[in-house]
Image (cartoon, grey):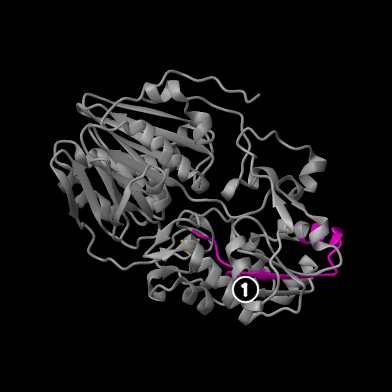
């Protein structure tokens, strides 16, 4: 049983839990197997005097669980005060009926965390919060600031003592003291650099913020007379909310009893949304800029089949994120699509740490082959990305051991060569296999019969969105902001 002892649900309530990692779509992650791209985070918010805002936020976070599994938290205001409850673990582990019943109010924000900066400790769980005079502010952050040193210096605090999200909370709190939200945000937000989609609240206001490059998504919806903010549209769908629109890059939405208003405090706005939201991070049933994520991933597979055809018997996805691209590949190549690998969907934060021997064969923890579908076949395996390569190598070995005659690997994105500084945890540049090896060398290392990556042009075309609106830094080295840390 997980070693957890809960403290009362008050501001700062929560506990330490002894946990292990799992990556996006529920796969055990770096902490267990040392591979995979880390998630960014999920943010959510609801304003509605007649709504059970904590319960709606719980379900919103449940839908956004894929964006972060390390900790979950909800802050609720009843007008008189703000209550924050957060803890390490999945949403369904952190909250139960009893705990939600103690979170009563008319507005709430929530957060799912995947640590990209700072440790995975309870202190870094969100929402973060500060008391400002007779009110309390709470903040949930998806992204990563790239100017934390300058911000810490400006605030006169030690950078190591606060996460980037706490630095923002501190900076906003100081500006807000004695003034209103519009003025405070107009002054403080332009001092933040990097990626930040935020939901913020105090006793009476719910606020949504998207950085001027719009790295991370944030959408606005309506439910039963209330207003909702969510990282993705799937967070609206789960509570039956209607999608209104995306928050624009550089836009701030303020929601209170007077209604909804929008301000634009940034002077230099140019959209650079993370292209990996389309490749990997967002849920396939979400939409972004009017495009279905699932349909875009299918198109990536179709293009991959044209760019890198393979003479094979079956197309097999690496579940789950490789499924739509494999479907597209199979349709375009007119080759049967088969489920040759099964993923264990039920590994949660309570996942017991495997023995060293099991860790060495790590991929079996999350994927197991269906021998009958692979035996004697020439297989094209479709996945969304290769980061460090060690897990992929194990996977290829497993498919071969299951009897595949040939294994051809197709990746529905270009080689991942540069680290991300905008909220994705991919390690340092030297850890990225594509920064050290050519495609042929990677194929040799993985021991595949052939390897093909989707081109950057092919990826961007598959999104069906203006290519100039994307960040592609990890694929191209073209960073949209100045980076002050070592690459
Ligand atoms: S560097 Fe890559 S992962 Fe990071 S925001 Fe840009 S496209 Fe996304």
Q: Residue 449's x, y, as percent?
A: 79, 74
Residue at the image position 65 percent from the left and 40 percent from the top: 347
Seen in the picture, residue 352 relative to 463 is either above or below; the reply is: above
Confirm or reject: label 1 Cβ below 8 Å from ligand 1: no
Seen in the picture, residue 106 relative to 68 is either above or below; the reply is: above
- Does residue 350 appear in the picture of this structure? yes
Q: Residue 97's x, y, as percent?
A: 44, 24
Who is closer to the viewer here, 311 or 81?
A: 311
Where, quadrant-wise, is the C terminus in this rendering?
bottom right
- Asked which quadrant contains residue 300, the reply is bottom right
- Asked which quadrant contains residue 483, the reply is bottom left
Q: Residues within 10 Å of mark 1 (few under 14, many from 20)?
A: some
Q: Residue 172's x, y, as percent?
A: 26, 42
Residue at the image position 62 percent from the left and 55 percent from the top: 320
Where, quadrant-wise, is the N terminus in this rendering?
top right
Q: Indicate left or right for 218 with 437 as reference.
A: left
Kindly identify which residue carries mark 1.
331
- Asked which quadrant contains residue 184, the reply is top left
Magenta region: which residues? 396-420
Q: Secondary structure at mark 1?
A: helix
């Amino acid at each position: 049983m997980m070693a957890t002892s809960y403290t009362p649900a008050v501001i700062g309530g929560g506990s330490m839990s002894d946990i292990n990692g799992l990556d996006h779509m529920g796969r055990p992650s770096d902490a267990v197997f040392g591979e995979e791209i880390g998630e960014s985070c999920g943010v959510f918010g609801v304003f509605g005097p007649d709504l059970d805002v904590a319960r709606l936020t719980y379900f919103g976070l449940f839908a956004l669980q894929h964006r972060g599994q390390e900790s979950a938290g909800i802050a609720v205001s009843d007008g008189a005060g703000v209550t924050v409850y957060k803890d390490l673990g999945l949403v369904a582990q952190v909250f139960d009926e009893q705990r939600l019943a103690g979170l009563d109010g008319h507005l709430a924000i929530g957060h799912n965390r995947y640590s990209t900066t700072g440790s995975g400790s309870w202190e870094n769980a969100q929402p973060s919060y500060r008391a400002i005079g007779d009110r309390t502010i709470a903040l949930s952050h998806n992204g990563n600031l790239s100017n934390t040193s300058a911000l810490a210096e400006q605030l006169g605090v030690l950078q190591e003592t606060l996460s980037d999200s706490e630095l923002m909370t501190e900076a906003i709190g100081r500006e807000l003291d004695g003034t209103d939200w519009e003025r405070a945000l107009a002054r403080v937000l332009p001092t933040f650099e990097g990626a930040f989609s935020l939901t913020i609240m105090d006793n009476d206001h719910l606020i949504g913020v998207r950085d001027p490059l719009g790295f991370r998504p944030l959408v606005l919806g309506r439910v039963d007379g209330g207003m909702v903010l969510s990282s993705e549209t799937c967070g609206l769908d789960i509570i039956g909310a209607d999608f209104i629109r995306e928050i624009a890059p550089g836009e701030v939405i303020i929601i209170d009893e007077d209604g909804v208003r929008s301000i634009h405090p940034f002077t230099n706005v140019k959209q650079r949304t993370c292209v990996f939201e389309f490749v990997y991070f967002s849920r396939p049933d979400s939409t972004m800029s009017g495009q279905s994520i699932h349909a875009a991933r299918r198109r990536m597979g179709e293009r991959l089949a044209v760019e890198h055809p393979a003479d094979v018997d079956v197309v097999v996805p690496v579940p789950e994120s490789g499924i739509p691209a494999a479907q597209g590949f199979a349709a375009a190549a007119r080759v049967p699509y088969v489920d040759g690998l099964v993923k264990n969907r039920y590994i949660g934060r309570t996942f017991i740490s495997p023995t060293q021997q099991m860790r060495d064969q790590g991929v079996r923890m999350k994927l197991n082959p269906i021998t009958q579908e692979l035996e004697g076949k020439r297989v094209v395996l479709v996945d969304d990305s290769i980061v460090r390569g060690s897990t992929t190598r194990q996977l290829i070995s497993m498919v071969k051991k299951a009897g595949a005659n040939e294994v051809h690997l197709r990746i529905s994105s270009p080689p991942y060569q540069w680290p991300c500084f905008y909220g994705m945890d991919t390690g340092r540049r030297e850890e990225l296999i594509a920064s050290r090896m050519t495609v042929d060398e990677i194929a040799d290392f993985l021991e595949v019969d052939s390897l093909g990556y989707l081109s950057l042009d092919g990826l961007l075309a598959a999104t069906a969105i203006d290519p100039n609106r994307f960040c592609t830094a990890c694929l191209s080295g073209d960073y949209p902001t100045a980076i002050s840390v070592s690459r």
